[in-house]
């Protein structure tokens, strides 16, 4: 077992850690040896997955080169996964059997797929997580079927499930059937009434059935309430993320769902030399939803706090979510829906705005990585 040591280990290439890498490239990296631990060279921007599925983007358009960003920031890239903390709480163990000691650690691995635990197992079930490999797994699954006459169910009534449903409708056209199983909480439960009404109307206009019941597999049959949805060729699950097991088994403080419990500075409640952000973390001072929007905005705050921890520069900061966040949902027909709290509107402009924001975000990291 090799024991490396670093001043800081960044575990995972999530949206918050992308903000850290960007800050260090633009403003200088704190002195010392730092490591980025991630299983693959690329991160995939989740916001562009529906558009890629629909054919609006190329399969590589949403990829971000972690290795190039790490090199630009002066950080060593290690290709591996974390599977726990060492007994001293100051080292990580990896899947390959190595150990990495650290002075400070930041964790942004995202959540894990929990669809099988929530609805049961079935060979047709395809969880969107891990996000990096979802598109490849989707294309492999569909390659065994003729898309003409294909029947697909999407599980999950949140923004992710809605956008995947519209993307599939565009992808399949009149050749296939798509049904959205939104769950007992209903369609876009956390959104305002007007947004729900606009999206429900658009789903109906595109011939997409919405079922507001919880789904489950029973003896190889997908049920929604007491109704069978068979026959089905594929079932895509855009359900809430689960927590990885290793933070709990390593002794990190976690919330009731197993996510790493952090304070307002994104610092572990049990291990003060460990920070966590994104879907793997759970703020204990206030409720912050697990959402890519919040993970992106946490990035600069995390960068400032890690710089303070390493160099003592600046002060510890906290991410304060706005009372409402702007969400842009593509409806797959050249239009989109924009929502902000109780406000909502629909039109082609919303889709254009979403594309502009998404591509600008990707282009920023491509430019930052461009020196490698």
Image (cartoon, rainbow, N blue to C red):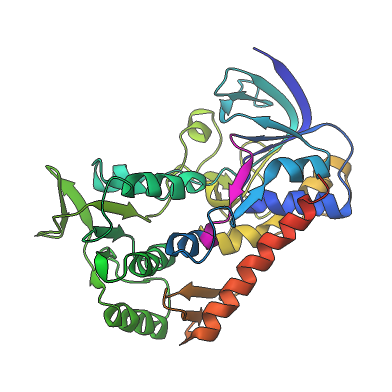
Q: Residue furthest top?
A: 1
Residue 179: image x %, image y %? 25, 65
> Left or right: where does residue 359 sit relative to residue 312?
left
Q: Image point 26% across, 53% down: which residue? A: 146
Q: Image point 46% across, 73% down: which residue? A: 330
Q: Is residue 147 above or below residue 126?
A: below
Q: Is residue 325 visible?
A: no
Residue 71: image x %, image y %? 79, 40
Q: Is residue 294 above or below residue 34?
A: below
Of 186 and 163, nearer the camera is: 163
What range is drawn magenta here? 39-48
Q: Image point 42% across, 75% down: which residue? A: 331
Q: Is residue 62 visible?
A: yes
Q: Quadrant of the C terminus?
A: top right
Residue 364: image x %, image y %? 74, 61
- Residue 340 falls within the magenta-colored stretch: no
């Amino acid at each position: 077992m090799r024991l490396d040591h670093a001043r800081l280990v960044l575990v995972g290439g999530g949206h918050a850690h992308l903000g850290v890498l960007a800050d260090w490239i633009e403003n200088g990296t704190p002195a010392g040896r730092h490591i980025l631990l991630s299983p693959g060279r690329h991160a995939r921007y989740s916001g562009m997955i529906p558009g890629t599925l629909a054919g609006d983007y190329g399969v590589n358009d949403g990829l971000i080169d972690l290795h190039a960003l790490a090199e630009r920031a002066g950080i060593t890239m290690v290709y591996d996964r974390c599977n726990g903390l060492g007994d001293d709480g100051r080292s990580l163990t990896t899947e390959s059997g190595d150990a990495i000691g650290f002075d400070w650690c930041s964790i942004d691995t995202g959540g894990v797929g929990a669809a099988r635990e929530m609805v049961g197992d079935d060979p047709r079930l395809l969880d969107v997580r891990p996000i990096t490999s979802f598109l490849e797994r989707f294309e492999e699954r569909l390659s065994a079927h003729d898309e003409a006459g294909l029947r697909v169910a999407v599980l999950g009534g949140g923004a992710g499930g809605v956008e995947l449903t519209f993307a599939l409708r565009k992808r399949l056209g009149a050749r296939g059937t798509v049904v959205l199983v939104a769950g007992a909480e209903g369609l876009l439960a956390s959104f305002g009434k007007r947004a729900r009404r606009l999206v429900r109307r658009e789903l109906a206009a595109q011939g997409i059935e919405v079922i507001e019941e919880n789904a489950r597999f029973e003896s190889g049959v997908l049920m929604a309430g007491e109704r069978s949805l068979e026959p089905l060729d594929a079932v895509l699950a855009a359900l809430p993320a689960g927590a990885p097991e290793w933070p709990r088994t390593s002794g990190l403080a976690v919330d009731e769902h197993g996510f790493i419990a952090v304070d307002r500075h994104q610092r572990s409640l049990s291990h003060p030399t460990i920070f966590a952000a994104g879907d793997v973390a759970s703020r204990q001072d206030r409720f912050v939803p697990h959402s890519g929007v919040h993970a992106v905005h946490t990035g600069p705050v995390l960068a400032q706090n890690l710089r303070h921890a390493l160099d003592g520069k600046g002060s510890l900061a906290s991410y304060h979510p706005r009372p409402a966040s702007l969400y842009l949902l593509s409806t797959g027909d050249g239009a989109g829906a924009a929502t902000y709290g109780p406000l909502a509107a629909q039109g082609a402009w919303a889709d254009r705005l979403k594309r502009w924001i998404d591509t600008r975000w990707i282009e920023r990291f491509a430019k930052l990585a461009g020196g490698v």
